[in-house]
């Protein structure tokens, strides 16, 4: 019995000693991580911006975390600027260990990817899963270390060292994949797209190529069969039929705005003319049309464009003041006629200025439309119209799909 009691006491003491040691080790693990090489670079004139970092997770951050993160980032920045790769590697390991025990991010996604280059871990740069996860870059929030990393990599790119160092990657597809990804941090999508096009036959890994296309590919060309246009000018209308006996020919205005898509033409226009009439010769006869022109472009060259169209819309005519005679003020018995308008015409555009993308010139238009004036001048007919307008045209672009070579999937 005494032996059992002694054994139980011994086991209890041993268990208590083991538990205390475990908790002591856990409480000091993060402190020991922070002691790794941080002291070598604590004295620095380069301070990281913490304004955005402090906002990351205020509910869980404490001031000690912020100070530790700042120390690590300053230390990594100095190691990078002094090309102290051994210390940089250990600092990165310390930062990764710190992140595991804290909710605070020390190294952001894009920074992790670029650091792999400086640490010589080219295998990660060729790994599609790693790149797709960490290939993010936000210049506006990460401060001095972020900028130092960006500047250092930019120097490597401009000097040719980047491509020279990547030559150690034996696989041609991996080598070009890593090069384009790192270039993507410094080139716009147009330049990166050109680089992908240039090296697509060297990117034999189809999944790598598809990722680059999905992430960076942006290419479009001017489509001569698509354009937006606008015009405004003066018109002249000739009345035919019964209406010509009661309404004189008249000058007016014509304005339109439309688009050409695959050479099909759609224009919305407003036009009007004011002239004398024999029914109420003390008043002007006023007609306005709000219409849509549907047509097709038969000829489209750099300097000229010719199209034909059908017209449908709404026409309105009434009377308007003529002079300052007080007797001719508007009366309640002035009638107004609303009627469906239809017809057709042709438009010829001459562009002495510009090219397909942006051009300007003159539009010569001619057509025929109905006119109904039963309530106003008690007559109907058709009207021939011509116009000379200033016209501007803006070309549209279309996206080009990437032409994949025959590569392995």
Image (cartoon, helix red, strand yellow):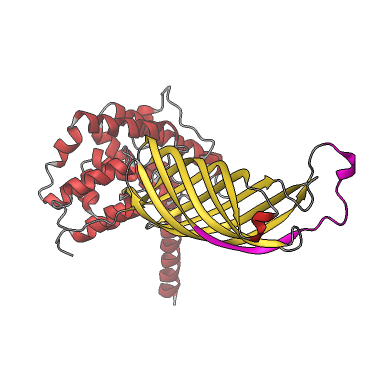
Task: Answer left or right for 383 relative to 156.
Answer: right
Task: Answer left or right for 114 relative to 1.
Answer: left
Extreme residue toward the bottom, this view: 1
Extreme residue toward the left, this view: 170
Q: Which residues are magenta?
A: 324-344
Residue 268 horizontal/vertical position (percent): 55, 54
Task: Answer left or right for 182 relative to 110.
Answer: left
Along the line of sight, which residue is nearer the eye, 17 or 166?
166
Extreme residue toward the right, this view: 327
**Count of labels in the image:** 0
Residue 184 in view of the camera: no
Residue 173 horizontal/vertical position (percent): 15, 52
Along the line of sight, which residue is nearer the eye, 171 or 122?
171
Residue 132 horizontal/vertical position (percent): 32, 54
Classify 334 as above or below 254. below
To which quarter of the image does residue 261 belong? bottom left
To which quarter of the image does residue 317 belong? bottom right
Along the line of sight, which residue is nearer the eye, 220 or 133?
220
Classify 22 as above or below 175. below
Residue 8 in view of the camera: yes
The quarter of the image holding the N terminus is: bottom left
Could you tell me which residue is drawn at 27 percent across and 40 percent down?
A: 183
Residue 250 horizontal/vertical position (percent): 63, 45
Could you tell me which residue is drawn at 45 percent across and 33 percent down?
A: 143
The quarter of the image holding the C terminus is: bottom left
Classify 120 as above or below 74. below
Could you tell me which residue is drawn at 73 percent across and 49 percent down?
A: 277
């Amino acid at each position: 019995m005494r032996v059992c009691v002694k054994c139980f006491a011994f086991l209890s003491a041993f268990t208590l000693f083991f538990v205390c040691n475990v908790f002591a080790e856990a409480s000091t693990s993060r402190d020991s991580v922070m002691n790794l090489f941080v002291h070598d670079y604590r004295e620095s004139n380069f301070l990281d911006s913490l304004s955005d970092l402090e906002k990351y997770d205020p509910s869980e951050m404490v001031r000690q975390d912020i100070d530790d993160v700042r120390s690590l980032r300053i230390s990594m920045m100095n190691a990078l600027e002094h090309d102290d790769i051994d210390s940089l590697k250990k600092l990165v390991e310390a930062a990764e260990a710190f992140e595991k025990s804290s909710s605070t991010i020390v190294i952001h996604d894009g920074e992790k990817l670029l650091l792999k280059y400086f640490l010589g871990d080219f295998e990660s740069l060729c790994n599609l899963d790693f790149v797709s996860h960490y290939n993010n870059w936000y210049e506006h929030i990460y401060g001095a270390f972020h900028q130092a990393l960006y500047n250092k990599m930019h120097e490597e790119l401009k000097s040719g060292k980047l491509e020279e160092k990547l030559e150690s990657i034996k696989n041609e597809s991996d080598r070009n994949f890593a090069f384009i990804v790192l270039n993507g941090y410094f080139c716009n999508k147009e330049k990166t797209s050109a680089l992908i096009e240039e090296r697509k036959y060297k990117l034999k890994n189809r999944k790598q190529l598809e990722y680059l296309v999905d992430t960076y590919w942006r290419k479009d060309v001017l489509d001569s069969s698509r354009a937006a246009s606008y015009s405004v000018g003066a018109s002249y209308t000739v009345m035919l039929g019964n209406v010509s006996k009661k309404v004189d020919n008249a000058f007016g205005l014509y304005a339109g705005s439309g688009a050409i898509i695959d050479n099909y033409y759609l224009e919305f226009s407003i036009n009007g003319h004011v002239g004398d009439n024999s029914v109420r010769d003390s008043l002007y006869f006023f007609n306005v049309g709000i219409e849509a022109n549907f047509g097709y472009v038969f000829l489209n060259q750099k300097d000229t464009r010719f199209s034909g169209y059908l017209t449908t819309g709404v026409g309105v005519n009434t009377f308007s003041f003529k002079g300052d005679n007080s007797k001719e003020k508007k009366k309640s018995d002035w009638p107004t006629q609303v009627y469906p308008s239809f017809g057709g015409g042709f438009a010829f555009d001459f562009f002495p200025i510009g090219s397909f993308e942006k051009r300007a010139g003159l539009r010569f238009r001619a057509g025929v439309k109905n006119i109904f004036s039963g309530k106003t001048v008690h007559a109907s007919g058709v009207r021939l119209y011509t116009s000379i307008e200033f016209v501007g045209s803006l070309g549209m672009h279309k996206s080009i799909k990437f032409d994949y070579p025959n590569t392995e999937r």
